[in-house]
Image: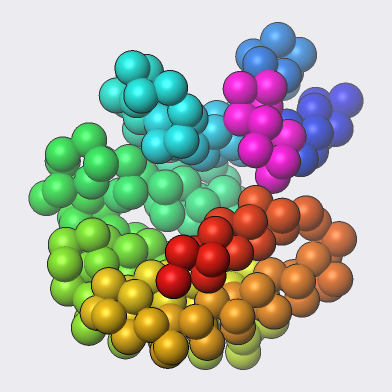
Amino acid sequence: MDEKILKNAQNLYNQEEWSKAIELLDTLLTTHDKQEVAEANRIRGWSYYYLGIKGNESHKTENLEKAEEYFKLSLAGAKENKTKVSALNGLPLVLWILGKKQEAKLESFKATEKFPQEPSIWNTKSILFRWAGDFETSVDVCEKVYRTAVAKKDFRTAGHGKHNRGNALASLGKVEEAKKDYEKALKMYKKHEKKTGENASFHLKRVNEKLSSL
């Protein structure tokens, strides 16, 4: 039963129903299994993250602080690397937005030390480089993310790599190159949907918004 709840919560998250995902976990999840609790906290962390950056501005800090709390709880209890990697990807982003930039850099460094071959960990690092204004380094790291993810047939992360590379290129004023990367990101996300059956509409929507803004 709890595995089904976790799956449904993940689906709600994928559909941008972040508040509903949290509510489902808070009201129906009864497990005491440490890994399942860690997975629930991972989903809560990401849901609060997006509520923080895309939700009501008056609740931004509150939601981001909850995201930080749940990512840390997830890391404390996670047994599976997939859960750890996801939480490690979210935590530095939350910390950076909350103004804890040195802590964010440290967490990202620790993550790349722990999972050096995991492309999504480097994807988070590429975002921090971009947020710090180091667009050229971000471009290079994003390309590494893309190539490593494609080799692992992790097409969602490959899409993230091209999406974020497009963002960095756009910041450098390289509009045509950015368009090419955004278009490649769309292909990767669609490939991910076809391979896994998972809904990638959230990511597709974001890339299409970037394309239309160029």
Percent across and percent down for residue 128 are 26, 61
Q: Quadrant of residue 68?
A: top left
Q: Residue at x 67, y 31 (%)?
A: 17
Q: Quadrant of residue 178?
A: bottom left
Q: Residue furthest top?
A: 27
Residue 46 appears in the figure: yes
Whether residue 20 is in magenta: the answer is yes
Percent across and percent down for residue 111 are 34, 61
Give the number of marks.
Answer: 0
Q: Using the image, determine if residue 123 lies above or below residue 82.
A: below
Quarter of the picture containing the N terminus is top right
Residue 154 appears in the figure: no
Percent across and percent down for residue 205 are 63, 56
Q: Which stretch is magenta?
A: 12-21
- 47 sits left or right of 193 in the view: left
Q: Residue at x 80, y 56 (%)?
A: 198
Q: Using the image, determine if residue 154 lies above or below residue 203.
A: below
